[in-house]
Amino acid sequence: MARQYNREKPKEKSEFDQKLLDVARVTRVVAGGRRFRFRTVVVVGNRKGKVGLGTAKGQDMSLAVEKAAVKARKKAVIIQTKGDSIPFEVEAKYGSARVLLRPAPVGRGIVAGGAVRVICDLAGIGSVTSKILTRSKNKLNIAKATLEALKKLRV
C-alpha cells in the first residue's frame, strides 16, 4: 500500500496582523428567491508603520475574509510616526465621514473609537487622540477617512 504525503507547502507566518472590522450580509434578488453573500472589511498592519484596508465579498464569511485580507496587504501604505505618536495634527474626509487625529504624549494610549482605534493599533501608533467629526456611523467610510489622514503624514 502506497503512502500519501501532504504535498502542500506549510503556510508561513505573515508579517501582518489582521482584524475583521465589519461584516455585512448582502442580498441579491433573483427569479428563484434571494442570494446571500457576505461583505467583509479587514484591516492588516505590521505594527511598525505599515497598514492596509481591504473589502471583499464571498459566498461564505471565511472566503470573504481571506479575499479582503489579500486586498488589504496589496494596498498597504507606509505611514510616518514620531516616536510612539504621529508628528502633527491631521484631518481627512472620505464620503460623509470626517476624522481628526491629534498627537498625544507618550503613555496616553489610543483615545479613539471603533475603526480609528483598530487602524491606529495595527499601524503601530501607541499614543494618539482622535475625533470623528460627523454623525456618520459607517465603519467603512470612517476607516477610509482614517487611512487618508494617515497618508497625509508623509512629509
Image (cartoon, grey):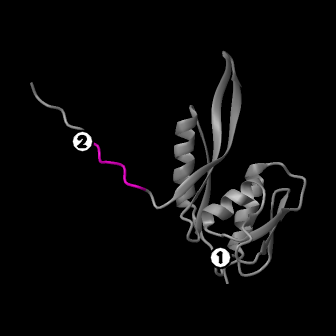
Residue at image point 71% right, 71% down? 127
Residue at the farthest left position: 1
Tag 2: amino acid = Arg
Residue drawn where x is 78% and y is 61% of the image = 112
- The residue tagged 2 is 7
Residue 139: assigned label:
none
CA gap, disc 1 to disc 2? 44 Å
Q: Is residue 8 left or right of residue 79?
A: left
Q: Which residues are magenta?
A: 8-13
The residue tagged with tag 2: helix, strand or loop? loop
Q: Position of residue 97 (x, y in %)?
A: 83, 58
Q: Quadrant of residue 102?
A: bottom right
Mark 1 vs mark 2: give the one in front.
1
Residue under pointer 1: 84
Circle 2: is it few (<14), some (14-19), or many (20+) Cα within 10 Å?
few
From what the image shows, is residue 34 above or below residue 152?
above
The quarter of the rendered structure image containing the C terminus is bottom right
Magenta segment's dominant SS is loop
- The picture quadrant where one finds residue 48 is bottom right
Q: Position of residue 94 (x, y in %)?
A: 79, 60
Asked if the magenta segment contains residue 9, the reply would be: yes
- Residue at 57 percent across and 56 percent down: it is 72
